[in-house]
Image (cartoon, rainbow, N blue to C red):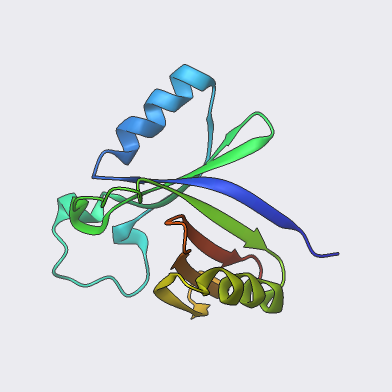
Amino acid sequence: MMTVKLTPYLNMEGNAREAIQFYEQAIGAEVLSIITYGEMPGMPNTFTDDLKNLVAHAKLRVGEAELMFSDAPGGSTIPKGKQVTICITTTDVEQSKRFFEALRQGGQVNMPFGAEPFSPGFGDVTDKFGVTFQIYTEGQG
């Protein structure tokens, strides 16, 4: 059976670790995973140690829900409207692709849908209402 999950995705400007610690204290968040840029496959050697320590992807559980975080690469500035995005997770690449194609109508593709090292089907799109979605397929496709 295919599942679909929507998760708030918080894009931080280099202070994701601080935010994660804050939410652990404030709302009882539990860290499920943290991957730094330094741990990602194929990261450029040009990354300084500071950049390598930034959070590429983190997942927290809060009660029955999840929160995801990442630092902007290089701790760069996040454009208005992109601080909080929504991650749509499915277990089916074809379904993910359908969501992506539907949401891009009249919107803007930020990252074309395709296979990535971390997902068999991933894309990033801002819809015609200015809401940004990351479509993420779980599993090995």
* Closer to the camera in the image, 17 or 12: 12
Q: Position of residue 100 (x, y in %)?
A: 57, 72
Q: Residue at x 42, y 56 (%)?
A: 130
Q: Residue at x 45, y 18 (%)?
A: 25
Q: In which quadrant of the rendered view does residue 23 lie?
A: top left
61 sits left or right of 133 in the view: right
Q: Is residue 135 above or below residue 94?
A: above
* Closer to the camera in the image, 96 or 24: 96
Q: Position of residue 29 (x, y in %)?
A: 53, 28
The answer, for residue 141, to whether it is visible in the render is no
Q: Position of residue 50 (x, y in %)?
A: 16, 50
Looking at the image, the residue that sits furthest to the top is 26
75 sits left or right of 117 in the view: left
Quadrant of the rendering where the N terminus is positioned: bottom right
Q: In which quadrant of the rendered view does residue 138 lie?
A: bottom right
Q: Residue at x 47, y 72 (%)?
A: 106
* Closer to the camera in the image, 76 or 18: 76
Q: Is residue 61 above or below residue 25?
A: below
58 sits left or right of 41 in the view: right
Q: Position of residue 71 (x, y in %)?
A: 31, 49
Q: In which quadrant of the rendered view does residue 88 lie?
A: bottom right
Q: How many marks?
A: 0
* Closer to the camera in the image, 22 or 93: 93
Quadrant of the rendering where the C terminus is positioned: bottom right
The answer, for residue 77, to whether it is visible in the render is yes
Q: Is residue 135 above or below residue 64?
A: below
Q: Residue at x 45, y 67 (%)?
A: 124
